[in-house]
Amino acid sequence: MAKPGTQARRKRSAPELPFGGAWSYEPSLESTDHVVLAERYGLFLDGAFVRPSTGRYFATSDPATGRQLALVAEAGPKDVAAAVVAAQRAFRSWRRLPGTERARYLFRIARLLLERAREFAVLETLDNGKPIAETRDIDVPLAAQHFFYHAGWADKLDLVFPGAVPEPLGVVGQIIPWNFPLLMAAWKIAPALAAGNTVVLKPAETSPLTALRLCEVLQQAGLPPGVVNVVTGAGATGAALVRAEGLAKVAFTGSTEVGKEIQRQVAGRGIDLTLELGGKAAHLVFEDAALDQAVEGVVRGIFMNQGHVCCAGSRLLVQESVHDAFVAKLQRRMARIRVGNPLDKNTDMGAIHSAQQLARIEALCAAGRAEGATCFQPPCRLPERGFWWPPTLFTGVAQSHRIAREEIFGPVLTVSTFRTPDEAIEKANNTSYGLSAGVWTDKGARILWVAERLQAGVVWNNTYNRFDPAAPFGGYKESGFGREGGRQGLRAYLRLPDAPTPA
Ligand code: NAI
Ligand code: MG
């Protein structure tokens, strides 16, 4: 680990980003020239864009300006049923295709995504509100990586699970949220296809454009019709997909509330289910940690994507002896966060995704103040149009406070203290969630001691929000079940009939 002295020098150049990218400091504005938008988007059924049977369209808009971007088809139960039938038909031949052939399609999709990376990054930023530096360096390249990674497994399934003859499940219904629209589509589609399944995907109603553009890439890659179908719409369309006849599995990422409802809907139907739900991750900073490095990690952990991240490090637990020094450093760092135009390369934090999400953040911050926590927000001028919230820090937070218990899903960090490692573990685990956690300490033995005791699917140490398609991701408790990524994620899209029964 780097000594504090080397940190100070390194900070002057671009700070390291996950996935090997770097923040760009070139002072130039991005243009939207790379993206041509249609006025209306249809549903992607059986390899073609079609009109919805409902005849209805809904608007999707740019959260940074409120400007309407396009109209998108609203799929009704009839459309969803047609999508499942198309996927069932496609499954018959797709499952029998040699793994090497399925791999070729996935490699092609990955390469096309990278060729069109700029277009996807700009479109994602427009439809979602997150900064272009993130869509360019994280969302788009990582989405491509998921296709590359799973392409590599497609012809090696028998090697992944020795002693078993893995079989695909069938048609998978996949429902994704708005916070990483393209990346979540890739997380869902790539392993499903590699394993030989076919897909009906429902993107979130407030950010459907990159999933629809991905359908263009699928066409370009020559993917056989029906292997991937995309039905757009809101919760009712998602519910229709969950209820549809002919599904072998449902995979959902979103709120815990909807996850529980889906669990009730699929109960007793013999359908596989994986749920990736909310989180309230603890971020533990011990007194021996490299504090400047930890500040960078904590900032990335909560302010990346405006805090609209299920694994966001939203509960900071700092060892009492360094609390004051750490909070002072954090506040100075927060004052340098640039909030504004998401299409500007230099922007660190973009727009809050929707009026609904902004209202939730506002309400929880008001509750934090009312319950007696101290609120810090650096002075920052927010744009007049669109949805915005400044980086926010609450100190003096008790474990009973709503802001310490409920998922805010915004740029809001709570700070509490601990004295001993045991107390740190107890506080970190004192939550109904268990998706992720972060540990900052210089002692290797302590990292292992802490990681073993944390109830969290992912534990990062001396880093945060670092993703890799080879690493399984998923939760404990109300954060859901099942894993995505790695061999464990692939396993969730396969049946292993003759696998040895675990003892
Ligand atoms: P949501 O769970 O309502 O939406 C996620 C997806 O589920 C969307 O595609 C939506 O259309 C669909 N959906 C909604 N109702 C459905 C139903 N009854 N059956 C099937 N699909 C349905 O999440 P929402 O309302 O956008 O956000 C609310 C809160 O949930 C956020 O403030 C945040 O705390 C949490 N959340 C967590 C996410 C995560 O990555 N774990 C992602 C999005 C939200
Ligand atoms: Mg909702």
Image (cartoon, grey):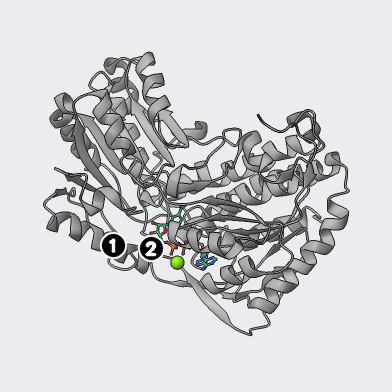
How many residues crowd mark 1 within 10 Å: few (<14), some (14–19), many (20+)?
Answer: some
Can the viewer see residue 35?
no
Lateral position of residue 249 relative to residue 350, left or right: right
Q: Which residue matches tag 1?
A: 383
Marks 1 and 2, Cα distance to the nearest angstrom?
8 Å
Residue 104: x %, y % from top left: 81, 42
Q: Secondary structure at mark 1?
A: loop
Q: Earlier in the sequence, mark 1 or mark 2?
A: 2
Residue 112 locus on image (x, y percent) = 70, 48
Would you say the residues marked 1 and 2 are in contact, meaning their CB atoms lie under 8 Å apart? Answer: yes
Secondary element under disc 2, as helix, strand or loop, is loop
Q: Nearer the viewer, residue 269 or 411?
A: 269
Place residue 369 in its image quadrant.
bottom left
Q: Does 333 sit left or right of 82 as displayed? A: left
Picture layout, residue 30 above or below residue 40: above
- Give the amino acid type for the residue marked by disc 1 in the picture: Pro
**Compared to 276, does 4 lie above or below?**
above
